[in-house]
Image (tube, rainbow, N blue to C red):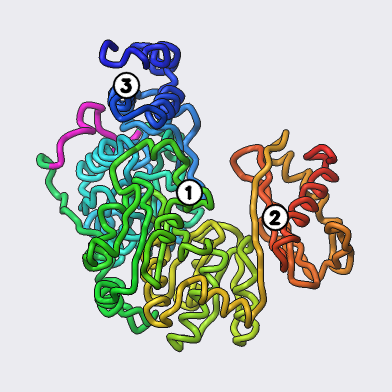
Amino acid sequence: MTDYPAAAPILKLYLHPDDHAASDYFSALKELVRQRNAADPAEARSWQNAIDEVYGQIRREILTNTSPPVNQVSFGTSGWRGTLGKDLTIHSVATVTCAILQLYRQGSADPAMAAALGGLDFSAMQEQGCVIGFDNRFGGELLALAAINILVANGVRVYYAGESTTGALSASVLIHKAAFSINLTPSHNPMEYGGVKYNAADGGPAAPILTDTITRMSRSYLQGEANPFMLSQDRLQTPLEQLKGVVREDVLASWQELVRTNRSSHGLDYDQITAACAAREELVVCVDAVHGASRDYLSRLLAEPPKARLILLRNTPDPTFGGIAPEPSSANIQPTMAALRAAAAPLKIGAIIDPDGDRIRFTDGRVEISMNQFGAMAYHFLHEVKGKRGMVAKTVASSNLANALAKDLGEEVFEPKVGFKEFKPVMGKALVYFEESDGISIIGHTPEKDAFIGLLLALDMVLTLNISLGAYLEQIEQEYGHFYPDRDGIVVSVQGEELSKALQQLERYQPGQQIAVGDQAKTIEEVIAIDGRKIIFSDGSWLMIRPSGTEPKVRFYVEARTPEETALLVKSAHSMLAECGLLPYS
């Protein structure tokens, strides 16, 4: 510790040599990152050395810890997430990979499971193979190698993509007709998290019958049940060069091929859009990669536009994300907005993309545009500008701006509960699929949310209409009405069944009743009891309350018709939770 004596007290407090269980590596890292960020350049190097030492110990834990995960394996909407070293190790990831292989053994005897697997039995799965990649998290390459060793040892063809985005991996599955993909990512979670995403042969989020089985089998194997697919610990890091059946995969090339192939479905001419992007001197694009997997793809994605007109922020490798939670939030998009305000070009497109590239949020430097607005804009663009016809699909917690568009256009709305896999019934029918948490895809593309297709859409909008994203949104709102969404989460004292039971008291709110919102009494016009309770008022404003499935937290979403009323709806949601006994009255 002589190279960084200032860090010694932090290391002593949180790190305990030769005792993984007692060491709190990520508390140490968070404090070290704070100190590094506040230090002058000369001192920052010393703090970085200390950060590197901690990551060295996390690496050792990832490689050697064979204890069951501290938090049990549990596959949710977007896979399994847990703490690196404590939950995500080469042993646990190898075990989860074995559980995935077991799906194809069991599928032969279970018609419902076989259908969810795309009709593939074990031998077909081996031949068609797996596409595998990881985001920028520390240890991603180690975890991916453990999974690859299990796959190769069990005769599975492997397409190795390296650091990749979720959408590009899904495109690769479709192009190669692979059986499935594995992405080592916890999406937008903070630095301490790792994760495993499994998508089946359709390239989209796996059905519950598959993820539930992976969860069950992983737990059984970790508890000591005989595992026919497992390797000894020392064989889980056999180098790629020594493995047969591994093919290097260029996932961006697969993504580009998919977009070009399906141009007639969605109307996006990839080569024309990127050529115009490079040629239009009045356009500047700024993208914040938040140090994530998209950073090495963005310039090539846009066909290498002049560097002066493609501004890339946070495009260096940093598994600490500079100490922020790496999500496309209002706070995190501020650097992009500032960079665009400083740019002289009349046409400006800004975006922030999460680490695994499945979420994106936009700006034109003047206004922020979340997926609540952009999803509706994408639907309007494909329907009215590209001349496509079809419904729109959005999660029930998303803005009703898209509902207003669809109603006026004479089209249907598919509005399922939260989770991109809930769009499966209308894939190939809806023009756009989006969710309020900044995920989007379109007809003819992957059934997985994809930031890259969102960015291509934004480019096409601006280049075709010759106006900013904010101006386009204003045009739409002037014709279809203004909607002002917001969302938040509140920690409560109960969770699980007890929380769900408390929230059943919201069933007292029925159409025709009134609820106080500020000094007004709003009449309930409709109640949607999907994934919680969405209460829609006669003026089109609404509030929604839903429990978290994994923690003692209630999530709520509101949408007002005036900006001033948004806060009042939030207060009304708080009052309703107080009536349920979940919050104190305020």
Residue 178 placement (x, y as % from top left): 28, 60
Residue 23 placement (x, y as % from top left): 42, 17
Determine if the magenta segment contains residue 126.
no
- In front of the other: 419 or 275: 275
- In front of the other: 443 or 501: 443
| Category of crowding for the residue at label 1, using alpha-carbon neighbours closer than 10 angstroms: few (below 14), some (14–19), many (at least 20) | some
Q: In which quarter of the image is residue 501?
A: top right
What kind of element bears circle 1? loop
- Who comes first in sequence, dot 1 or dot 3? 3
Residue at the outermost left position: 242
What's the magenta region?
227-240
Which residue is tagged 2? 532
| Category of crowding for the residue at label 3, using alpha-carbon neighbours closer than 10 angstroms: few (below 14), some (14–19), many (at least 20) | many
Residue 451 appears in the rendering: yes
Instruction: Look at label 1 and name its amino acid.
Output: Asn
Residue at 35% x, 31% y is 89
Instruction: Locate residue 235 relative to residue 326 in the image: left or right.
Output: left
| Category of crowding for the residue at label 2, using alpha-carbon neighbours closer than 10 angstroms: few (below 14), some (14–19), many (at least 20) | many
Instruction: Locate residue 211 relative to residue 309 in the image: left or right.
Output: right
